[in-house]
Image (spheres, rainbow, N blue to C red):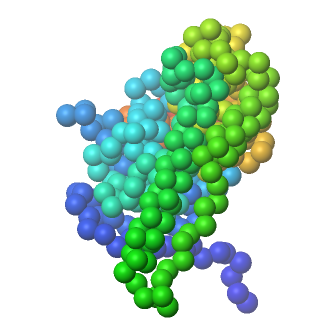
Amino acid sequence: MKSAVKKEKIYTPKFQNKRKTPVEPYDVNALLEVQHLTKEYGKLKVLDGISEKIFNGEKIAIIGPSGSGKSTFLRCLNVLEDPTDGYVFFEGNNLCDLKVNINVQRRRMGMVFQQFNLFNNMTVLKNITLAPLHIGIRELNKQKRENFKIKFLNLFRKKDNKLPVLPLQTTKAKIKDDAKQNAMRLLKRIGLEEKADVYPSTLSGGQRQRIAIVRALAMNPKVMLFDEPTSALDPEMVGEVLQLIKELATEGMTMVIVTHEMGFAREVATRVFFMDGGKILEQGTPDQIFGAPENERLKDFLSKVL
């Protein structure tokens, strides 16, 4: 009788490892995987050898006291912080390998910051369409350059050896129109379509954070990373931001959320990581973490925040 346990698929990456810790085979089923993730600032070790996997559709809430390494861990996932040691794999790509184009990988990793990080000299619509426009037009220009190269080389080829020109799938005007329509669709979703032509500085904190979220969604990411998305908001504005994140969770978006909102973590997360001292000291389902914690440090932490 065959075992019902699914065999884990692993793949050993082939590249020169110049870090202290040897790279290990990684799980190709994982959307994100970190191996021995370490981050040091001088003699201060902020992350201490974390190894973990995150799979498609998971909602990971990261909790813990201030200074425990939560935000640094999140920023290492898309290499906004370069790990001192260890590895980060995203969809099978080692983001710590210099051969990997990190900017291409980040297109599929939405990031939402504590302080919104909107461009105050641009309208709301411009903030949302900036990245899709830039990438779309750059890819179009890249294809045009390739066609020019083909046409030029065809001048020196015999008739039977000439290469076909690549058909252009879009135009600059269509890219702009698609980006605007998508931005307006996202703004309508959060009830802020009438704010498209205003500047972020005229909006409330809750409105700015929701716009920051839909700006990340405009890139159609595979995973959303939230770094304490409500910490800079007044209490009455927290609910509207958490509601949008809950809707994304219901729709199946993979997300990793650093949060101090324990009730939100318990309601939305599929797994909760408790961090302290740069390590994940305990992890499990919300019921396990909040209802039956095992780690003494976690018990002490929950007694103070619940």
* Location of residue 240 by image quarter: top right
Comparing 79 with 268, the one in front is 79
Q: Residue at x 24, y 57 (%)?
A: 19
Image quarter where the C terminus lies is: top right
Q: Please count the marks in the image.
A: 0
Instruction: Determine the residue located farthest toward the left in the rendered image.
Output: 42
Which residue is pictured at 77% across the width and 18% down the height?
194
Q: Is residue 221 above or below residue 33?
A: above
Question: Is 115 left or right of 186, judged from the image as shown?
Answer: left
Where is residue 102? Give x, y as percent: 41, 51
Query: Could you say which quadrant of the image residue 256 lies in?
Result: top right
x, y percentage for residue 291? 68, 36
Q: Position of residue 8 (x, y in %)?
A: 57, 73
Judge from the rendering whether residue 134 lies leftward or rightward of residue 49; answer left or right: right
Observer able to see residue 74: yes
Classify residue 297 as left or right of residue 37: right
Can residue 299 be spotted in the picture?
A: no
Q: Nearer the viewer, residue 284 or 113?
A: 113
Residue at left 27%, top 46%? 84
Which quadrant is home to the N terminus? Answer: bottom right
Vertical order, 109 against 163 (above or below): above
